[in-house]
Image (tube, helix red, strand yellow):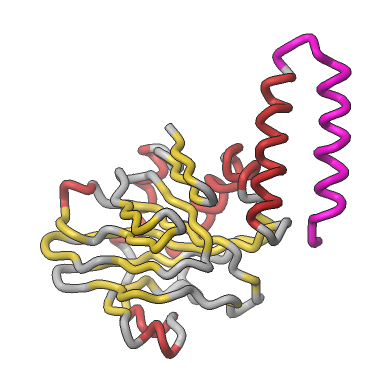
Amino acid sequence: MIIETGNYLELTQLINPSELSSILNLIEQSNFKDGKSTASENAANVKNNLQINSENNFHAQQIGQIVHQAISKNRRIQSAILPKVILPPLVSQYESGMHYGLHVDSPLMGNQFTIRTDVGMTLFLSDPSSYEGGELEIMTEFGLQRFKLSAGSAVIYPTTRLHQVLPVTQGKRLAVVTWMQCAIREANKREIIDQINQVLNELSATDHKESHLMLQQIYSNLIRMWAEI
């Protein structure tokens, strides 16, 4: 099941139970550190969580491979987001009393390489019934929206929006976060491309071969016009 509102993409079970189990096993073998170390100065002032050090960390790299493969093979993400570059993901942990106050993501991120952060993604790893609080709250153009998804599900959101992780009041919240640079920078243009692609998929199951071919030409030419490679 996929829920879409504007530029927000919610994906149920982005990773399957086997992949989720593998990630959780890798987390158990890893060490956490203060999450402030990966935040900008302003964000660090409101950030109170733990993260796995991804630098030279074999377990973190394995988690990153699982998440990257899940993103790469997901057709909805490829159609709606058109990710060009994906940052190595961070595993975050919120224990009771921890939170990440209202902030905006840095426009540029990366250590080994730098990307423009067009969208962010939170992949939930904990069963929502296992902790209280900890919702991802985003100030969208439709008002405040809160996300507390099932384990293995994810939400992708524009980094231009203020957002926060509300305090965890009981239990432990585990999640993977990452950011992507899109091949097409502007969200409204990505939406047009996605809409055309969905119509193309519908036409492929019909006998309207000429219409499909003409729309495929439009789709390809718009990507040539708008893509940044």
Q: Position of residue 21 (x, y in %)?
A: 33, 45
Does residue 185 lie above or below 108 as drawn?
A: above
Residue 8, given in percent of the width and then of the height, sits at 49, 50
- Left or right: residue 131 versus residue 25 is left
Is residue 178 within the magenta segment? no
The outermost residue toward the left is: 170
In this rendering, would 130 be left or right of 75? left
Tell me where residue 80 sits by quadrant.
Answer: top right
Instruction: Look at 52% across and 77% down and name the residue there.
Output: 106
x 16%, y 50%: residue? 130
Rendered image quadrant of residue 79: top right
Q: Is residue 117 left or right of residue 213?
A: left
Which segment is the magenta one? 205-229
Residue pictured at 57% horizontal, 66% vertical: 87
Front position in the image: 39 or 59: 39
Left or right placement of residue 29 versus residue 197 in this view: left
Quadrant where the N terminus lies? top left
Residue found at the very far bottom of the displayed protein: 41
Whether residue 228 appears in magenta in the rendering, the answer is yes
Residue 77 image offset from top left, x and y in percent? 58, 45
Q: Give the camera-side residue of 91 and 22.
A: 91
Seen in the picture, residue 146 relative to 59 is either above or below; the reply is: above
Q: Position of residue 15 (x, y in %)?
A: 44, 42
In the rendered image, the quadrant that contains the C terminus is: bottom right
Q: Is residue 3 above or below residue 171?
A: above
Where, by quadrant of the figure, is residue 17 drawn?
Answer: top left
- Secondary structure mostly taken by the magenta-highlighted segment of the chain: helix
